[in-house]
Amino acid sequence: MPSVSGEITAAFAVRSGITQLVRKYHASPLKIAKTFRYENGTLTGDQPVEQLGVYMMDCSPGLMSGDHYEINVRLEEGARVFLTNQSFTKVHPSLAQQSSSQRQSLHVETGALLEYIPEPLMLYKDARFFSETELHLAPGAACMISDILCPGRTQRGEVFQYSLYTNRMKVWYGTELIYYQNQRVEPQTMQLTAPGSWEQETHLGNLYVFSDRLKQQHLGDLLARLEKLNGMEDVRIGASLTYKHGMIVTVMGRHAWKLQHVLAQAWHELRRSLLALTPLMINK
């Protein structure tokens, strides 16, 4: 395990009827900014549902060679949190094959909701990055996580010039492992433009949704909404249910902002159909 160069630990719980940040620790260059509160509209006409918004900050230029970030988040029973960061996560060139890395540990207890929508990840030329996410989900909890991978600083001609990208995700429902992903992209050894691979696309985005309330109908409603975007946004979109209590929405294209738009539409639709909540409008 590499030494930690930046860390965030945060715990959220319901106190006096609202979600509050009850414990936090951060180590430079990572920091938790001041929290703010949302009132979610409901589709049932009930009272608005409160939710806490949290921004993570990185006061450095990004992950340098050998840097390791740790992010640990826990939501106690009934807590509702929207979590994001301020800007792209930037990974600088790795020296002497020394990878940068990030490990995220997320715990979502019964009746809690975590929506984790960070800005895209950008890998500079010669960057090596290892990402690992572990999600622990209790019965009745819900979690949505997005990620977008950029091929480099495209305006400088950096397209698939990074050395290595590895992304692992494990999702536990109670004590049962219900989802495992192990993605590895090594542009110099892969024919990414080959048919059936990335072909002409350069950016990859995903929205991961986990809840024991997910049904086939939620997938049908989502596909109907996304069908209206296919061919209009110059992207390729797909969605499917996982083995158990999960759904993955995947989008490929050539511009990060287009992927963000499509994934936001998917996120808004799932808030409507799964959670009976109106879209959460985030301005940055």
Image (cartoon, grey):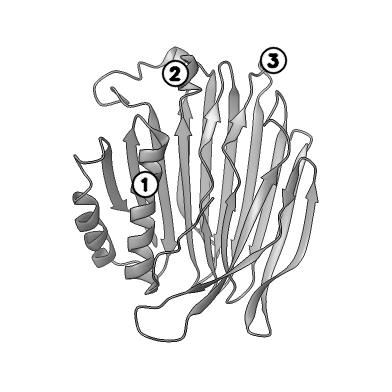
Q: Position of residue 191 (x, y in %)?
A: 35, 16
Closer-to-camera residue (174/85):
85
Position of 265 with respect to 85 (left or right) is: left
Q: CA distance from mark 2 to mark 3?
A: 19 Å
Residue at screen point 59% across, 21% down: 127
Q: Nearer the viewer, residue 48 or 30?
A: 48
| Left-right relation of 241 to 114 | left
Q: Secondary structure at mark 3?
A: loop
Q: Return the residue at label 3.
A: 95
Q: Amino acid at mark 1?
A: His
Residue ID at (46%, 39%): 148
144 horizontally vs 104: left or right: left
Q: Position of residue 241 (x, y in %)?
A: 31, 55
Residues at discs 3 and 1 in contact (Cβ within 8 Å): no
Mark 1 or mark 2, which has the lower sequence index?
2
Residue 261 badge: 1
Q: Nearer the viewer, mark 3 or mark 1?
A: 1
Say which quadrant the N terminus sits in: top right
Q: From mark 1 to mark 2, how far is it between C-alphas?
A: 22 Å
Quarter of the rendering containing residue 43: bottom left
Between discs 3 and 1, the one toward the N terminus: 3
Residue depth check, mark 1 versus mark 2: number of the one nearer the observer: 1
Label 1 with label 2: CB-CB less than 8 Å = no
The three-letter code of the residue at mark 2 reads Val
Dot 3 alpha-carbon crowd within 10 angstroms: few under 14, some 14 to 19, many 20 or more = some
Asked if residue 213 is positioned above or below residue 207 in the image, the reply reads below
For the residue labelled by badge 2, is the local secondary structure a helix, a strand or a loop? loop
* Residue assigned mark 2: 159
